[in-house]
Amino acid sequence: MPKDLGDRTVLVCIKCSNTIEVSGKSPSPYRTTIAVEHSNKERTVVVSNKEVRGLPVTKDVVCPKCGWREAYYWVVQTRAADEPSTRFFKCTKCSHVWREYE
C-alpha cells in the first residue's frame, strides 16, 4: 500500500510492514509492481496453546513424534490458489506440529 510521508512516498507491505522507497511522484497501482520477498520465517505459522482450544480435533492421525492418535488441525492455503491446501496438525499430548499436503 502506498504511504505518503510528507516529502516522500513509500510502499508498505500489509503483511510484514516492510517498506520500499518510491522515486518520483505518488505510485500508481496500475503501473507500479514491486514484489516483496518474504523469508521462510515470515511464512511460519505459530500456534500457541491458547489458540488451539477452539480448533477441531481429529483421531484419524498418528503423531510422528510420540505416536498419540489425537491432534488439533487447521487448513491453510500456503501455495497458489489453484493448488491444494496444506493441513496442519498439533498433537494434543506432546504439542508437536506437523503438516500434510492434500
Image (cartoon, rainbow, N blue to C red):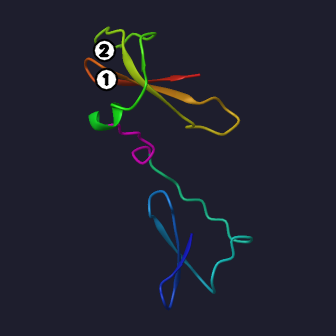
Please report contact status of discs 2 and 1: CB closer than 8 Å, yes or no. Answer: yes
Residue 29: % across, % down: 69, 71
Q: Dot 1 lies on which element?
A: loop
Horizontal arrangement in the rendering, residue 30 relative to residue 69 (left or right): right
Rendered residue at 63%/86% (across/down): 25
Q: Dot 2 lies on which element?
A: loop
Rendered residue at 51%/61% (across/down): 14
Residue 94: % across, % down: 25, 19
Label 1 crowd bin: few (<14), some (14–19), many (20+), radius 10 Å: some
Horizontal arrangement in the rendering, residue 81 relative to residue 11 (left or right): right
Q: Quadrant of residue 69?
A: top left
> What kind of secondary structure does the magenta stretch mostly adopt?
loop
Residue 65 is tagged as 2
Callout 2, which amino acid? Answer: Lys
The image shows residue 41, relative to residue 98, as above or below, that is: below
Callout 1, which amino acid? Answer: His
Rendered residue at 67%/39% (across/down): 81
Q: Quadrant of the N terminus?
A: bottom right
Name the residue carrying label 1: 96
Residue 33: % across, % down: 67, 65
In the image, residue 41 lies in the stretch drawn in magenta: yes
The first of marks 2 and 1 along the sequence is: 2
Horizontal arrangement in the rendering, residue 69 relative to residue 23 (left or right): left
The image shows residue 25, relative to residue 73, as above or below, that is: below
Q: Viewer-proximal residue, 87 or 35?
A: 87
Q: Residue furthest front?
A: 54
The image shows residue 22, relative to residue 34, as above or below, that is: below
Q: Viewer-proximal residue, 66 or 59?
A: 59
Rendered residue at 59%/82% (across/down): 23
Magenta segment: 40-47
Label 2 crowd bin: few (<14), some (14–19), many (20+), radius 10 Å: few
Q: Viewer-proximal residue, 49 or 33?
A: 49
